[in-house]
Image (spheres, rainbow, N blue to C red):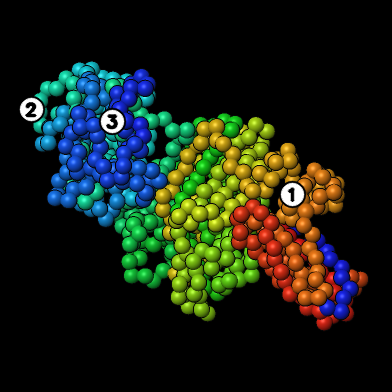
Amino acid sequence: MKTEYTLCALFSAGLMISQVQAGITFEDDFESYTPGDSPSPTNVWVDAEGMTVTNGGSWGSQWVNNVSTDGWSFATLDMPDAAVMTISFDAYFDTADFGDGYMRMSMNGDLGNVNRLDFGKNWDMRKGTDFSMDKVQHFDVVMNLSGATVNYNGTSIAHDSFAVWVDGAQAGPASGTAGSGGEYPMDQSGSENNTLITKVGFWVNAAAVQLDNIEVRDEAYVIQYPWDTVFNYEFDGTVDGTVFSNLGGWDSLNQWGFGFINTNVTGARLVHRPESTEPEFEVNKKGWNWRGVILTNGLGRAVVTNEAIEFKMDYSMFAYTERSNRNGIDFFLTTNHTALADNTAPHEASQQYFGSEPEAQMGFRTKQLNWEVGGAWPDGGFGLTLDPVNVGDVQLSMSLNAIGITNLSGGVAADIESIPMTITYTAQKTTNAGIWRVSVEIANADGDVLQSYSDSSYTNQVLYDAEDIYFGMYAFHNAEGEEGAEMDNMRLRILHEAEPVYTPYENFLITYGLLGESKTADSDEDGLNNWGEYVFGGNPTNGNDVGSQPVFDAVSGNYIFNLIGDNSVIAHIQETDDLVIGTWSTIDTVAVSETNRVLNAYTNSVGTSATKKFLKLIVD
């Protein structure tokens, strides 16, 4: 879809302690303190001198830093006694500050090995396995000294036990991985028979542990998130060389070595770079130079209307040198799931790759569109296709420069790795039969959105009616040299009653009550379609308002036009000297970089030497 403006010109030129709701006996969010203070009052926070209230950093609010400058720091939280208790808190464990130290939660204020739960390298809760580093996580620690089993949250906890939940998923000692379930014994020394939990101590042997939003309840409690997690792979703590298909949660289908786990300075990553010669990529550990498909065990239920399937990951591209229009990796939803042995054929069509059976697939394919740095927009750089019917079409693209690949020379890759990109794909099941609202967003490490795309009327009846949906990945076999991809923090969730996230153009339509109208529709019948009204600042419901029109200044020779501040807008300036037999040629392309949602002026110097010239502005 393109919008054209043709100009014909003839010219010669904090809340503290409270009991505000049932179950909560204490809460502290540290917002009422002055930075530099220790938590108070002293009859609740005991020996809290090692804790310092701080602001800024990863939280965006005030939090408490438990600093262990002398190797140990201990603070006790003395709250009302209870036989069943849950202490909830948000925590951030920084790799540099936490190191090989640990944080001990000791019940009843005991400093020793009685009634304790340790977070550390090789302790009860193991870093990189049971909890992550360098990110804010929510913890619910449930304790039971009631003398009986307590039921809660669809599970139960035995007497004399801890249960630990991280971001709503249970972590336990059964297999040492988050979500596996299980309990930790409370009286680990066997020397006590407590019947009440009287206080909780935070004992830190690390440079720093950051805590916030502490809540204590006299009941078994787990935070309820508005989503169901299907899988969440962070790869931290995974042994280098582990083949991805050997990790739990994936069925063994036709695996031709999709990829392996490799640890570098930024942590453990899933790598698919089949022909890489980097020394750490040992033979048979880098992903074979062949295609591979892996699928999950499925969502386990049908998706109901207004729910959304969300796939999110960190993705770094390694560029193909002297290659154009190369496929990367497919990430897709499908209805078919037939467990086949390795290399067994035939395979279900929809399990092979994105586009092999489009009526049963939704998702996207990563692509390298051009290897040249600064290649012609939108053809140069990184792209995504979301249409399994027309897999050659690209719905979203960015230049190589925009993703940090700035130094390709000839056939030699001098700087081929992109910046880490966070890709979020969402498919929301609408109330209209067969219709999904699909969106994808690419952001940098700071959370700044680099590019986005959405389709509010994406049709897929098969998946709409499916009783179960599976997620697949497909890696292509035509890799050469150092190219490929690294992936991390791969997460698949079902969002309950998901709130739609609208694009700037859709917000424009909402303003005029036209949401759902296509870009090509001309709602006010003034000859300019709705997309043109948006781009040039017009009103799609007023036939007399077409916004700011391009003009030519015959004195300066400048072609002047205004475009909306939306980085999905691309404008092409074309010219011809004969409208009858002449052909249009593109003399310049403008890729809008602003995101301020206001009109921004652009000037192109055309010159005044020609006796006649016709100019056209095409916006897509």
Q: Amino acid at mark 1?
A: Lys
Category of crowding for the residue at label 1, using alpha-carbon neighbours closer than 10 angstroms: few (below 14), some (14–19), many (at least 20): some
Horizontal side of residue 12 vs 137, given as left or right = right
Secondary element type, mark 1: loop
- What residue did someone put label 1 on? 519
Which of 36 and 310 lies nearest the eye of the viewer? 36
Horizontal side of residue 370 vs 264, given as left or right = right
Secondary element type, mark 2: loop
Residue at 59% in and 31% down:
305
Horizontal side of residue 127 vs 296, given as left or right = left
Q: Amino acid at mark 2?
A: Ser
Q: CA distance from mark 2 to mark 1?
A: 73 Å
Q: Quadrant of residue 464?
A: top right
Residue 217's x, y, as percent? 30, 25
Q: CA distance from mark 3 to mark 2?
A: 24 Å
- What residue did someone put label 3 on? 87
Earlier sequence position, callout 3 versus callout 1? 3
Q: Nearer the viewer, mark 2 or mark 1?
A: 1
Using the rendered image of the protein, determine whether residue 390 is visible from the camera's viewpoint. yes
Residue 25's x, y, as percent? 30, 23
Residue at 45% in and 75% down:
414
Q: Quadrant of the N terminus?
A: bottom right
- What residue did someone put label 2 on? 191
Q: Amino acid at mark 3?
A: Ile
Q: Are marks 2 and 1 in contact (CB under 8 Å)?
A: no
Q: Quadrant of residue 267?
A: bottom left
Residue at 27% in and 35% down:
172
Residue 130's x, y, as percent? 29, 42
Q: Residue reaching furthest bottom? A: 609
**460, above or below 20, in the image:** below
Category of crowding for the residue at label 3, using alpha-carbon neighbours closer than 10 angstroms: few (below 14), some (14–19), many (at least 20): many
